[in-house]
Image: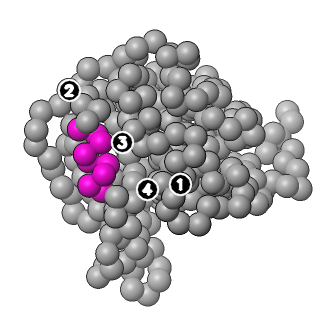
Amino acid sequence: MHDLSSSHTRSETFDTLFGGKIRVVQEKYGYRFSLDAILLAGFVWLRRGERVIDLGTGIGVIPLILGKRGEGAEEIVGVELQERLTELAKRNVLINSLASLIHIYQGDIKCMDALFPHSTFDVVVTNPPYYRVASGRINPYSQKAIARHEITCTADDVLQAARYLLKEGGRIFIIFPARRAVTLLDRLRNAMLEPKTLRWVHSREGEEAKFILTEAYKGGGEGVKVLPPFFVYSHDGKYTPEMETLYSDAIMN
């Protein structure tokens, strides 16, 4: 049987996650997945039989993690605007033998009605473009720029897509820069997605938060739970025990 992982080109790298339980091909110099995808996937919880969609899936890392966890999702979908990243995500699904569970589509988040019926997903997961176009230096690599800046879609576009896709009572899991937390929470409510669980992510204890992880419900009532902060690194520069657990226990099979 041909090893799909051995067919990457010189412009690509072949990398492993979770002790080799997940294998991915990604661009050497273009868009590459980052730690925030691992953090977001670790924040997501699923029920057996649920349909899940990852908006802006990149090379498909979040669907791969959720698929390998073995929680019994009925289907995991990834949607990506960029053709090249869509191609890589599809290859990664095949490399990890998850084609029966994970389906990747190329599509525009602003046009989800062209791909899926209204209210057909139980869970939306998204690591959306973080930065406004006017803020910060735009990454010279277009793949990275589109993934990180609100060039082709805004946070509002992502949340409106989530509202369209989710069943009543369905939930969205999202990671966002801590300094834009008020914007996120305000826009979630504007989209009638009620924040229910929050968790601040810090690089180290004593440093300000870098990200906010948020779970919100379509049609949920008021009332939010704030979890203890998550620290990625200890003061000695190594991963904290909780981060180590996230890497070691994230994959069940």
Task: Kindly identify which residue carries mark 2.
Answer: 219
Q: Earlier in the sequence, mark 3 or mark 2?
A: 3
Q: Is residue 76 left or right of residue 187?
A: right
Q: Secondary structure at mark 4?
A: helix
Q: Position of residue 208 (x, y in %)?
A: 31, 75
Which label is found at residue 155? none
Main secondary-structure element of the magenta-colored stretch: helix
- What amino acid is at disc 2? Gly
Q: Earlier in the sequence, mark 4 or mark 2?
A: 4
- What amino acid is at disc 3? Phe
Q: Is residue 66 left or right of residue 235?
A: right
**Spatial CA span between label 3 and label 1:** 24 Å
Q: Secondary structure at mark 1?
A: loop
Q: Foreground mark, 4 or 1?
A: 1
Residue sitting at 26 percent across and 65 percent down?
229
Which label is found at residue 173? 3
